[in-house]
């Protein structure tokens, strides 16, 4: 009994932080805030969480988890099933291939990377949704959402890094 | 080898996601049941985190109201005066209506019953306009029921779980509501397109809706009962007429699901193409 059960439980709890914060981000993103016009452009907190953890702890937030969270979000949010899952897996893939540029560089690189991911995610969603509904959706909301997400990214990123430093290092 | 395996697994997941999108088309009933289950399972958590959000919203709201207290009071006094006169008129008309109905042996619509439910999630996003409310099958919610907030229609129930359900708002891309214009009694289709103001479609040439006139449900298609206010004609140009919903859809805390006892199941199923069934 070199490693006690409490220690192992503690470690398991800490290791589940990336997954659980991503799920929490998804649920918080669905809060009815009752701000005029907010919910159309609500920043994609889930995407931010997946982006952050895919860069810093891809060993704890596995690609299949990103997929699962995407499916959950689609089921819960009423969006076409598979759309968020597709976006999150693609975003994860992109991050993983470009990880060495984002990791270890300054925060500006992290921000720039997210800007790329947010724009890409918006584009993929827009194309997928337009194809699914056979209807060219007006891209205004998608653009506004991506811009707002880019502007607000430092705040959630700061929260994630606080959690990351205090629980996982 | 490992990189290859990884690439393969990503490809597999991308294909799985696309497969899921296709499946929505192939077996919407199954997907719908899955949505209802998952929403049920998460409803308590969503309901829990919606409470502080509501508190924050109400603090912001009361701050805003404080600044306009005096003017608001003045307006309400005038409103009250005017409404009292209307009340008299309404009472007189009701009596007259009753006596005329008595003369005609008119068969009234079945009485409506209401289910009031709290909004627990507003999933948002750029593509869908839905709300999740904390009332489901066991509270008497049925698919196709009209959802109202305050004085107007906001949408209809599209998915019912055991204790939660989903409302498709009138602004959603897939929302279609048969309506009638107040002054001309012209029938039209109110069709959401994910913007704040749904469009009026299928208005014949020559009929020009006037800005400011009200739009009611027409009751055609058996989906909604007739005569519920939906919105106000906001603007019309190039033959395109936009309607502002009568209720501010971004600030709904409670909804009333209305059971009119109309057997509208089949018509309700037929009238909705698209992804969010």
Image (tube, coloured by chain):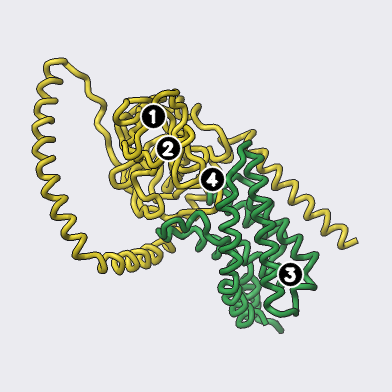
Labels 4 and 2 share a subunit: yes
> Mark 2, chain letter?
B
| Chain for colour green | A
Could you say where residue A128 lies in the image, as x and y percent from the top left?
Answer: 66, 45
Vertical side of B248 occupied by B146: above or below: above
The residue tagged 3 is A59
Q: Say whether marks 1 and 2 touch (CB < 8 Å).
A: yes
The residue tagged 4 is B35
Q: Which mark is residue B236?
A: 2
Labels 1 and 3 share a subunit: no
Q: Which color was chain B given? A: yellow
Taking the view exactly as shown, the residue that stands out farthest to the right is B1
The residue tagged 1 is B208
Could you say where residue A144 lies in the image, as x and y percent from the top left?
Answer: 56, 57
Q: Say whether marks 1 and 3 touch (CB < 8 Å).
A: no
Cα gap from disc 2 to disc 3, whole angstroms: 56 Å
Dividing the picture into quadrants, the one containing residue A70 is: bottom right
Cα gap from disc 1 to disc 4, whole angstroms: 42 Å
Q: Which mark is residue B241?
A: none
Dividing the picture into quadrants, the one containing residue A20 is: bottom right
Could you say where residue A40 lies in the image, as x and y percent from the top left?
Answer: 51, 54
Q: Residue at x 20, y 62 (%)?
A: B71
Labels 1 and 4 share a subunit: yes
Q: Residue at x 64, y 39 (%)?
A: A132
């Amino acid at each position: 009994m070199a490693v006690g059960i409490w220690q192992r439980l503690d470690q398991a709890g800490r290791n589940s932080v990336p997954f659980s914060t991503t799920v929490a981000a998804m649920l918080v993103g669905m809060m009815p805030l009752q701000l005029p016009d907010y919910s159309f452009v609500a920043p994609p907190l889930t995407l931010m969480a997946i982006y952050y953890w895919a860069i810093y702890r891809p060993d704890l937030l596995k690609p299949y988890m990103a997929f699962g969270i995407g499916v959950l979000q689609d089921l819960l949010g009423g969006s076409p099933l598979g759309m968020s899952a597709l976006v999150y897996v693609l975003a994860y893939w992109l991050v993983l291939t470009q990880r060495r540029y984002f990791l270890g560089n300054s925060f500006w690189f992290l921000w720039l990377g997210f800007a790329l991911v947010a724009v890409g995610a918006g584009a993929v969603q827009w194309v997928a949704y337009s194809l699914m509904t056979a209807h060219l959706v007006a891209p205004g909301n998608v653009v506004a959402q991506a811009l707002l997400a880019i502007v607000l990214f430092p705040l959630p990123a700061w929260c994630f890094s606080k959690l990351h430093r205090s629980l996982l290092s | 080898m490992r990189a290859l395996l990884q690439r393969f697994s990503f490809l597999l997941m991308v294909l799985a996601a696309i497969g899921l999108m296709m499946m929505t088309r192939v077996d919407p009933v199954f997907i719908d049941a899955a949505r209802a289950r998952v929403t049920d399972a998460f409803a308590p958590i969503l309901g829990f985190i919606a409470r502080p959000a509501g508190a924050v919203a109400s603090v912001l709201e009361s701050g805003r109201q404080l600044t306009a207290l005096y003017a608001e009071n003045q307006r309400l006094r005038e409103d009250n005066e005017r409404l009292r006169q209307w009340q008299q008129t309404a009472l007189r008309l009701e009596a007259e209506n009753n006596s005329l109905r008595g003369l005609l042996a008119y068969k009234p619509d079945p009485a409506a019953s209401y289910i009031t439910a709290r909004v627990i999630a507003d999933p948002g996003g750029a593509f869908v306009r839905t709300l999740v409310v904390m009332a489901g099958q066991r509270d008497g919610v049925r698919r196709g029921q009209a959802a109202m907030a305050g004085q107007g229609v906001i949408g209809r129930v599209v998915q019912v779980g055991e204790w939660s359900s989903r409302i498709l708002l009138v602004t959603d891309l897939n929302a279609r509501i048969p309506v009638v214009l107040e002054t001309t009694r012209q029938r039209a289709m109110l069709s959401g397109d994910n913007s704040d103001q749904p469009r009026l479609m299928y208005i014949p040439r020559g009929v020009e809706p006037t800005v400011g006139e009200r739009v009611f449900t027409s009751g055609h298609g058996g989906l909604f009962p007739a005569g519920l206010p939906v919105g106000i004609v906001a603007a019309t140009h190039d033959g395109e007429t936009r309607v502002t919903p009568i209720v501010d859809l971004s600030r709904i805390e409670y909804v009333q699901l209305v059971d009119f006892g109309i057997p509208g199941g089949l018509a309700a199923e037929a009238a909705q193409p698209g992804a969010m069934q």
